[in-house]
Amino acid sequence: MKKIAVFTSGGDAPGMNACIRAVVRTANHYDVEVHGIIRGYDGMIKGNYIPMNNRSVSNVIQKGGTILKSARSEEFRTAEGRKIAYESLKENGIEGLIGIGGDGTFTGLKIFSEEYDIPVIGAPGTIDNDLFGTDFTIGYDTAVNTALDAIDKIRDTADAHDRIFFVEVMGRDTGYIAIRSAIGGGAEMAITPENRVPAEGIIKKINSSESGERYSHIIIVAEGHTPGYANHLAQKTKEAMPQHDIRVSMLGHIQRGGSPTASDRVLASRLGVAAVEALLADKSSVMVGVINRKLHFTSLTDAIEKEKPLNVELVRIIEILNGRIF
Ligand code: F6P
């Protein structure tokens, strides 16, 4: 293989740049030319490629976002769009493809490799940590630390006023960000898409914990498929307990930005190297991941289709360690 391309797609995640850097420098190490595709699948269709060398990725390891930009492409969902993308890859002499992103990115790669004879490798880049086949995705650790920093600050003011705070974090299909930041932030409860406790459940727990004294409570809510769910829970709780001072804080997209943590930089670097080496070893249609600290390859089909359940041990210890009021 003499020439490959790398792109980022879907929601950006801190550490994507570290992964691009690792891909470019590993390709260079093996004398393979590498091009960056700008704006994911959209750039593939439009022929938006840039040649990259070691200098193109200097000074990016510490930066959030993605130097290759990201976009969602409706056109790539169509057979015609994918045909144009394939022709454009061929015109540019690209013989292998590395996509950094989440399940949407991998679904595109999988379909593409079924239709055309081009090897593809996926590197998991999403703050949600929702991909089967890897213990951690690139960006997850940074997002949790960003959420934690905010939760610590919210706790100061919650405590000063003895308020109940509902803090909404990201996580569309899983509550990974919610449970880890709840444990780290000492929150009293985490509501996740896997465990959508209705408002009544929360109210019951707060009631059963009332001892006459007032306390502040922090309840972490993963947004799931309905961003703003924390508002709904807060409103219902206020109706049932008008004596409590209740506030909502939505952390939103700040969780997607910022300088990646050491863990994310190292993970991204490992996965970038592994992705190029996988292409050179004639692997295709797999995601590179890390399980029990070791590199692991999972078919794109499994990475997309198999569920990654929440770590039950983490779920259990929230109530034991942080359940001051429950
Ligand atoms: O998939 C990553 C993610 O950040 C989710 O946690 C969140 O629900 C979604 O992307 C937000 O997407 P957008 O940036 O398109 O609003």
Image (cartoon, rainbow, N blue to C red):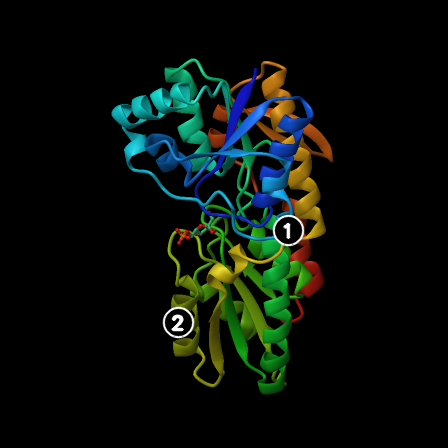
Q: Report if the CB atoms under discs 1 and 2 are less than 8 Å apart.
A: no
Q: Residue at x 45, y 19 (%)?
A: 93
Residue 236 - label: 2
Q: Which secondary structure lies at badge 2?
A: helix
Q: Residue at x 63, y 67 (%)?
A: 149
Sooner in the amino-acid sequence: mark 1 or mark 2: 1
| Residue named by callout 1 | 141
Residue 98 at least partly seen: no
- Residue 27, how many percent across, how many down? 62, 26
Q: CA distance from mark 1 to mark 2?
A: 32 Å
- Residue 304, how many percent across, how many down? 47, 31
Label 2 neighbour load within 10 Å: few <14, some 14-19, many 20+: some
Viewer-closest of 210 and 297? 297
- Residue 32, how many percent across, how many down? 60, 22
Label 1 neighbour load within 10 Å: few <14, some 14-19, many 20+: many
Viewer-closest of 166 and 266? 266
- Residue 81, how many percent across, how many down? 29, 28
In the figure, 1 relative to 73: above or below? Answer: above
Name the residue type under label 2: Lys
Name the residue type under label 1: Asp
Q: Residue at x 60, y 53 (%)?
A: 63
In the figure, 115 relative to 314: above or below? Answer: above
Q: Quadrant location of the N terminus?
A: top right
Give the tally of numbered discs.
Answer: 2
Q: Residue at x 63, y 63 (%)?
A: 148
